[in-house]
Image (tube, coloured by chain):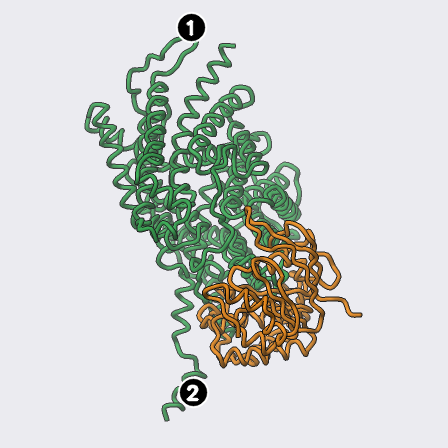
Amino acid sequence: MTVSALECRSVSKIFGGVLAVDDVSLTVPSGSVSALIGPNGAGKTTLFNVTTNLFAPTSGEVSFFGKNVAGLSSHHIAALGVIRTFQTARVFPGMTTIENILSGAHLHVRTSVASQMLWSRTARQEERCLTEKADAVLDMIGLGHARDVAATDLPIGAQKLVEVVRALMAKPKLLLLDEPAAGLNDRETAELAVFLRAICDAGTSIIVVEHNMSLVMEVADLVFVLDAGRLIASGAPQDIQRDPKVIEAYLSRPEGQIA
Amino acid sequence: MTSILQIVVGGLLQGGVFAIAALGFSLVFRVTNVVNLSQGAFCVLGAMGMYYFQVNFGWPILPASIAAVVCATTFCLLVGAFTFVPAVSRLPSSSALVLTAGLLTFFTGITLVVWGNQPYALPPFSGEAPLVIGTLRIPSQGIWLAAISTAMILGLWLLLQKTTLGRALRACAENPAAARLMGIDLRAMILLSFGLAAMIGAIGGVLVAPVMSLQFDSGQFFTISGFIAVAIGGMGSFAGSIVGGILLGVAEQFAAYYVSSLFANTLALLLLLGVLVLRPAGLFPSGPQRRSDVRDEGRIHRAVVRLPARRGLAFAVILLGVLAVVPALPMPSGLLESLVISLILYIAVLGLDVLMGYAGQVSLGHAGFMAVGGYCAAILATSYGWPPFAAVVAAVILSVLCALLLALATGRLRGHYLALATLTFGLLIDSLAVGLVDLTGGPSGLVGVPAFEVAGFSFNTPMRMYYLTLALAAILVLGLEGGMRLGFGRALKAVRSDQLAAAALGVNVSRVKIAALCIAAALASLSGSLYAFSFHFLSPEMVETTRSFEMIAMLVLGGEGTLIGGLFGSLALTLLPTLVQDLAVFKTAVEGALLVVIFLFMPEGIFGRLVIWLNKIPSHGTAIAYAKAKL
C-alpha cells in the first residue's frame, strides 16, 4: 500500500467562536488529482491553511506522506515536498517573470552563498541548468515572451499560471493549488486542466480548492465536498454530482450552483 | 531620603518632557500606524519660535508662546501635507518610517540654517525661584509643565473619545479602508493627526526651553527619548506614553546620580531593549493592532530596474575606469580625501543595500555596526599593537557576533519593531562609545590610530587609501552581484516582497534575514575600521545615529536594490558639501529633503533613473532588427 499524500484526522479550527472547520477527516491518496469543493464560506481555504500550518488546528492532526506536521513552519512543510499556492495571485513584485519562476527552485539550490559570491563554476552551472528548466516551463504555459517583464505587470490569469509553475520548480511531491482557475477564461481553464493532468502523470499529487466545476469534473479523480466546515461527501466526480446532500448544500444558498 | 525625593522630582520633570514627546508619537501611530521620527523636531521648532518672539521681538510670555506654537504647527502642517500624508497613503509603513527619519533630518537642517548651531536657553515663565516644600525644591517651570501636560492629555482624550472627529480619527486607526468607505477623508485625518502631534510637540518645546538648553539637533534627543518612552509604555496608548515617559525620566535621573551621567543613556536603552524583547507591545498594549508584517496590497509595487548583462558589464568597466583615473586629474585640495570617505561609506552602504534594498529590512542603527568595527579595530591596533589587518578581521567577526546577538534578542520582533530595535542598538553602541572613556577615549575620541598596513605596505597617503578602498569596493560589488543574481539574492527579494509566499516555497525567512543582517554588519564593520585607519582617529560623532540616517539617505538617493546605486548616493552627499563649502550649512537640510523627495517621487533613485534612461537607447542588435522590419 502506498502512503497517502495527505491525511487529516478530526481536524477542527475555531476562529473566535466560529467553527470554520468542523471535525474533518480525509485521506488523499498519492498519485491522484483531488478537488476540495464547497459553497462560499465552507472552510476550504481555512482547511488548506490549517494543513500547511499557516494556522495551527484547534484540534486534530495533519500529516503529509505519513509525517505529522504539528509544529513545523511553512518552510519545513515545503521541504517535505508539499508546495502550496495562494487564493490571490502572489507573484513577487519587483522581480521579473523568470526570476519569479526561478525563485521556486529555492529548495534545489545546492551551492552555498559563498560559492555564489565567488562566481564559482558550480554555481554558474547550476544557475544555467535552473534557468533552462525555468525557460522550458515558461514556454509550456505560453509566456515565453513575458520572460523579462515585471511579473506584476502580467494579467491576473497569467500571474496565477506563473505561480503554479513557480511551485512546480520546487519539484513538489504534493501540490496544493488554491483556486488556480480564478481569473482564467474557459479556454485557459481547459488548458489548465490538461496541464494539471500532465503534472499528475509526471508523478506529482495535486489537491485543488476550486469553484470552477468544469475544471473539477474534467481533472479530479476524487472530490471532497465541504459545507459549513463539515465534510459532507467524498468520492468520484460523477457520484458527487448526483449526491443529494451535495445538491442540497449548493441549492440552499442563493449564489450556490453546481456544474 | 531627601536626596532620593529630589532625584524623583528631577525625574518627574524630565519624564514630563519625554511624556509630551511620547504623546505625539502615540497619536500619529494610532491614526497612521507609522512611527513618526520627526516628532522631536516639533519641540525644537516650538522652542526656537518662542526664543524668536520672546527675545528678538520682546513679546510677553503668553502671546510669544501662542505665536510660536501657531507658527511651528503651521510650518509642520505645510511640510506634512506634501510629504507625510502622501507617504502614509502610498508607501509601505517601513518606508514611511524611513521617510520620517528624513523629515527629522530636514527639520534639524532648517533649524541649523535659521538659528545656527549655538545653544539657546529661555527664562522660566514665573521666575527662577523654585517652590520649596520642606527641604524639597521644585522648579517653578516644573509646575507649569505638569499642569499644561495634564490639560493636554485630558483635551486629547476628550477629543478622541467624545467627539465625532475623534471617532473618525480612531476609525482610521482601526481600519483605513473601511473608514474611507464610510466617507471619512483619510488624508485629512492623517494630516490632522500630524498637525496635532506638531502642536503637542511645539507646546512641549515652549515649556521645556526654560529648563534645558536647546540647539538645532536637540530634536533627535526628543525623538529618541520620546520613542523610548512610548515603546516602554506601549505604542499608541496615551496612558502608556505618560507612564513610559515618567519611568524613563526617573530611571535616567537615578542612573545619572548613582552611576554616571555618561551611562544614563545606556541604562535607558537597556531598559528599552529589555521591554522590546520581553514585552514587544509595551507595558500598556493598546488593543489589537494592524499587523505590519503582512504585505499591504498594492503598496509595495516596485519597478523592475535592470541593465541587460552586456550593458551592465560595459557600464561597470567604464565606471571603474573613470574612478581609477580620477586621482590623476588636477583637483582642489581635500577632494581626494572626500573621495576616500565616499568610498569608505559606500562599503557600509553596500551592506545596508543587501539588508534594506534586497531583504527589505529597515535598519536605523547601521552606524552602530560601523562603531563596533571601527572601535574594535582601532583599539586592537592602537592599544594592543595588533597588525591592522588582523584587527580588521577581528572587528568584522565581533560585528557579526553582535548582529547574531541582536537577531537572537529580537527574533520575535517584526515589521517596524525590528527597525526600532536596530535604532536602539545603534544608540546603545553610541552611548557605550561615549561612556567607556578608558577604552574608547569617550566623547573626545580615540587618537593615534596607525595607518592601515598589509604585509609591510602602509596605506599612509590619501592616494593609497583611495586605491585600497576602490579595489575593496570593486571586489565587494563583484561578489555581492554574484550572490544577488543567483539563488541567495532571489530568496532575499522573495522575503522582501512576500514572506508568506517565500516560506511556502521553502525559504527559511528568519535565516535569510539573519544572513542579510550579518552581511550588512560585516560590511559596516569593515567600513568603520577603514574610517578609523584613514583618519587616524575615531570619535563617537563619526559613527552616531545621524550617520545611520545619512547612509539611508545615500542608499535611497542612489537607488535601493542595485548595489551600484549607493556609490552615487555617497558621492553626491559627501562631495557636494566639500565642493560648495559656502553651502555646507545647508547639508543637513538638503540631505533630509532629498531623502523625502526621492522616496516620494523617484523611488528608483539616481542609478535607477540612469538605467531607465540607458535602456531607452536602442542596442546595436535591436536597431538592426528594427531597420530590417522597416524594410
Q: Is residue B507 left or right of residue B614?
A: right
| Precedes in sequence: disc 2 or disc 1 | 1
Nearer to the camera, B66 or B561: B66
| Residue carrying label 2 | B625
Q: Is residue A112 left or right of residue B209?
A: right
Residue displayed at 57% across by 80% down: A140
Q: Secondary structure at mark 1?
A: loop
Q: Which chain is green?
A: B
Alpha carbon distance from label 2 to label 1 = 94 Å
Residue A12: mark in rendering: none
B25 lies above or below B290? above
Residue B304: percent from left, percent from top? 46, 67
Identify the chain of the residue marked 1, using the numbered disc in the image.
B
Nearer to the camera, B443 or B231: B231
Q: Which chain is orange?
A: A
Nearer to the camera, B295 or B410: B295
B122 lies above or below B232? above
| Residue carrying label 1 | B134
The quadrant the C terminus of chain B occupies is bottom left
- Are circles 2 and 1 on residues that touch, CB within 8 Å? no
Identity, as a three-letter code, of the amino acid under mark 2: Ala
Q: Secondary structure at mark 2?
A: helix
Q: Is residue A117 visible?
A: yes
Identity, as a three-letter code, of the amino acid under mark 1: Gly
Identify the chain of the residue marked 2, using the numbered disc in the image.
B
